[in-house]
Structures are given as C-alpha cells and as structure tokens.
Image: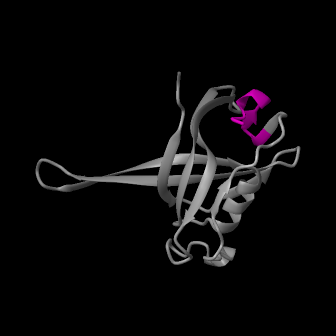
Amino acid sequence: MSVNKVIILGRLGQDPELKYTPGGSPVCNFSLATTESWTDKAGQKQEKTEWHRIVVWGKLAELCNQYLAKGRQAFLEGRLQTRSWDDKDGNKRYTTEILASTVQFIGGAAAGAGAGAERGTNNNVDTSYAQAAPAAQEYQVSNDAHFAADDIPF
C-alpha cells in the first residue's frame, strides 16, 4: 500500500497563471510559500521558506485564477507529481509539483498584499471546491511541459 497526499497552507508568491490546453481544458499554475520558524541553540530566531509549485485543473483552475492573488493565503490538498521534459538545448529537465484536488481561499481581500481586491474577491463566496477532472487526452500546459493521459491524476 502507498499514499501520495499533500496538505499545505501558505501564501501565493505571484498571481496565478491560467492557460487552456489545445482541447480547451483550463489549467492554473502558481507558487505557494510555507515558512518554518524556530529558535536556534544561540537563542536566535531562524526562518526557512519553502516554495511549492501548484497545478490546478478544470473549473477549480478558473476559480483559483479569479479569487487568488499574490500574497493571499490558500489551503489545499493534492498529490505530488514529478515530470520531465527536454529543454530547447536537449537537456532533460525535471520538476516536482503539487496537483491540487481541493483549494480553500483563506481570508478576504485584505489578507494578502492587496490580494484579490483587483480580482473581484467576494468574501461571501463558498471557496471550498472539488476539482473537476479534464478529459483524458494529451495536454500541453506550456511550451516546455507535456502531459500524457497517464500523467493526469484523475
């Protein structure tokens, strides 16, 4: 038996980027920062920030693009996936990302650094959504990232 589950709460590092596959399926990409704080042996406060690449598909991708913005907090669940591609010079490149299956938008427009205000955030909106699965076909998310039907987690 194995489990591949990620639960994460963090702040967006930039505004989400929404694209559509050639088949018309929406896909949204953004980065989420998590920060760990501790006091070292000398009594000094230390911090370490980890950046996580997030990928969201379907209607949830469109909602993330609409309601999330740089600095806004998000709570999400999903799974890890590592994929590879050949760059323009023929070198093999790898990335590990979180494929989000649910996303909750935390806080209102004032929660982040201007988060959501210019995107029309409505604090009365139920922001917990289950992700819709895209149709099984080959996907091209960006110029350097290819997905096959077997790579899609649903």
Q: Quadrant of residue 140?
A: top right
| x 61%, y 30%: residue | 93
Q: How many marks?
A: 0
Residue 73 sits inside the magenta stretch:
no
Q: Is residue 138 left or right of residue 120?
A: right
The color scheme shown is one colour
For image coordinates 76% across by 43% down, the residue present is 133
Residue stretch rendered in magenta on the structure: 140-154
- Which residue is depicted at the point 80% across and 43% down? 134
**Vertical placement of 40 versus 3: above or below?**
below
Nearest the viewer among 133 and 71 is: 133
In the figure, residue 153 lies in which quadrant?
top right
Depicted 51 relative to depicted 137: above or below? below
Classify the position of the C terminus by image quarter. top right
Residue 148 sits inside the magenta stretch: yes
Q: Is residue 85 left or right of residue 106?
A: right
Q: Residue furthest left?
A: 42
Which residue lies at the image location 74% right of the left edge and 59% below the top edge?
62
